[in-house]
Image: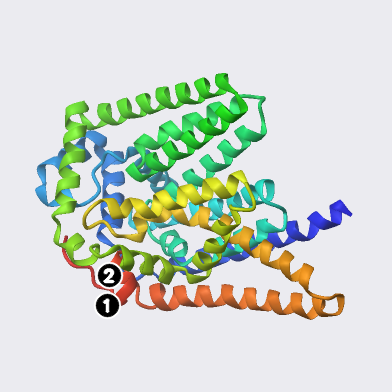
Amino acid sequence: MKTNSRSLPFLLCVLVMLFGTALRVIDMGSVRFRSPDENVYASQAQKWSASGIRSVADEWENRTELAVFPSPVRIGYLLPLRIAQAITGDATPNAGAELSCVASILSLGLVGVIAWRNLSPTAAPIAMALFAVCPPELMAARRAWMESFTGCLGTLLLLLMLECLRRSEPRAWLVAAGALAGWTVTVKETSVSQAGLLLLLLCIAYVRQQRWRDIAIATAVFAVTATLGAWWVSYSIGGYNRTVEFFHRSYTAVANAPYGRMYETGTAASWIKAIWIADPLLVSLAVIGIALLIANRNTLLFWSAATSLLCFSLPLTTEHRMNLRYASLGWVPLCFLAAAATVALWQWLKRHASTKEQLWAKGFAIVVFCLALVANYMSFRERFVSTDLQDLSLRMVLNRPLPITPER
């Protein structure tokens, strides 16, 4: 009986995996225009292959107009992009888009594994389905941005840390989690924030379990890996002082750029509205999932709520940075909360419906959920694909402007 109860969810996971992969591959070729950031990433990776990363840093430093674009300190992303260009033989942003697509597909599989092991087999295909049609994630998967790549790293890190709680031995899981958390220093600033929060949550859980040695191992591995990563970035760029100057220059330029003032500025209310508009199905179910924390002290749900809150709150702490791309690490945790809510609603239906009513009630609920998934995907095509939207900035998501990106 236990085998039968797992075989159907497993089959559904496989079908959703194929379905989600198809959606990502199909939409890759529909991009008509590449955004400035996509072209910059592709150019930096190509120049690194041709003349070294130091030449990329020299160019970014000497050309003042490049200050509003990503600096070459994100070599933890530029390196895999370089590899993608070498494998595909394509130095255009198309190689970056293919890397994003692969990363998003891997994230889809990781979502299923995490939900299966930490919620229930029933929740796994639901979480995967919600992530498969999540419009912001589908948008990132067809672009040569780094958001799908960082999202994949964040999802993998979440899986490793949850496994650390489940397994006291071997400590290879703990070493891998600490190393990956430290490695995010080389990738992106928001990745470091998420990794730090997950490491803190892991250490808090270890304190409750009195696993002091594991706390020491996790923090030590994280510190060593982060230090080595920071050294690699500084050495590649041309020194510690130069790296710090790059961060300062980039932050100052972006804060004062016309693009940010025009498209990424708004109120907290407008930011919340943009999040809901981007994926109303996921956000609505996730709110119910947060309410479940009161009755269900599930580690994954608590970590998901904390992580999503951090990711969606960070853009509010800086001026002119309200862009859903910067909150990309928050969508996966919402999928777990939403899946838990969906399973809870399903169980409520089973308890309160009579035996005769359950068959049609279950069928009706499945049809409604599937139609909601289809509506989510159609919303993505209408809002993002048909307009060839160039970014996920606040004003673009709310006002659906023409696909024209102003000069930064």
Q: Which residue is located at x 81 percent, y 79 percent?
A: 357
Using the image as rendered, state which of residue 329 and residue 70 is in the foreground: 329
Residue identifier under label 2 = 395
Closer to the eye: label 2 or 1: 2
* In-front residue for pair 50/128: 128
Answer with the quarter of the image where residue 270 lies: bottom left
Quadrant assignment for the N terminus: bottom right
Q: Which image quarter holds the C terminus?
A: bottom left
The amino acid type, in three-letter code, at marker 1 is Leu
Q: Secondary structure at mark 1?
A: loop
User: Residue 107 placed where, x, y %?
Assistant: 54, 51
Residue sitting at x 34%, y 54%: 326
In this picture, residue 74 sits left or right of residue 80: left
Residue that appears at 38% across and 28% down: 226
In contact (CB < 8 Å): disc 2 and disc 1: no
Classify 120 as above or below 131: above
Q: Which residue is mark 1?
A: 402
Q: Position of residue 330 (x, y in %)?
A: 45, 54
| Residue 95 location, quadrant | bottom left
**Residue 392 seen from this side:** no
* 389 to the left or right of 374: left
Q: Nearer the viewer, residue 143 or 95?
A: 143
Which type of secondary structure does the marked residue at label 2 adopt? helix
The amino acid type found where label 2 is placed reads: Arg
Residue 284 image offset from top left, x and y in percent: 52, 68
In the displayed orientation, state which residue is furthest to the right. Answer: 1
Q: Residues within 10 Å of mark 2 (few under 14, many from 20)?
A: many
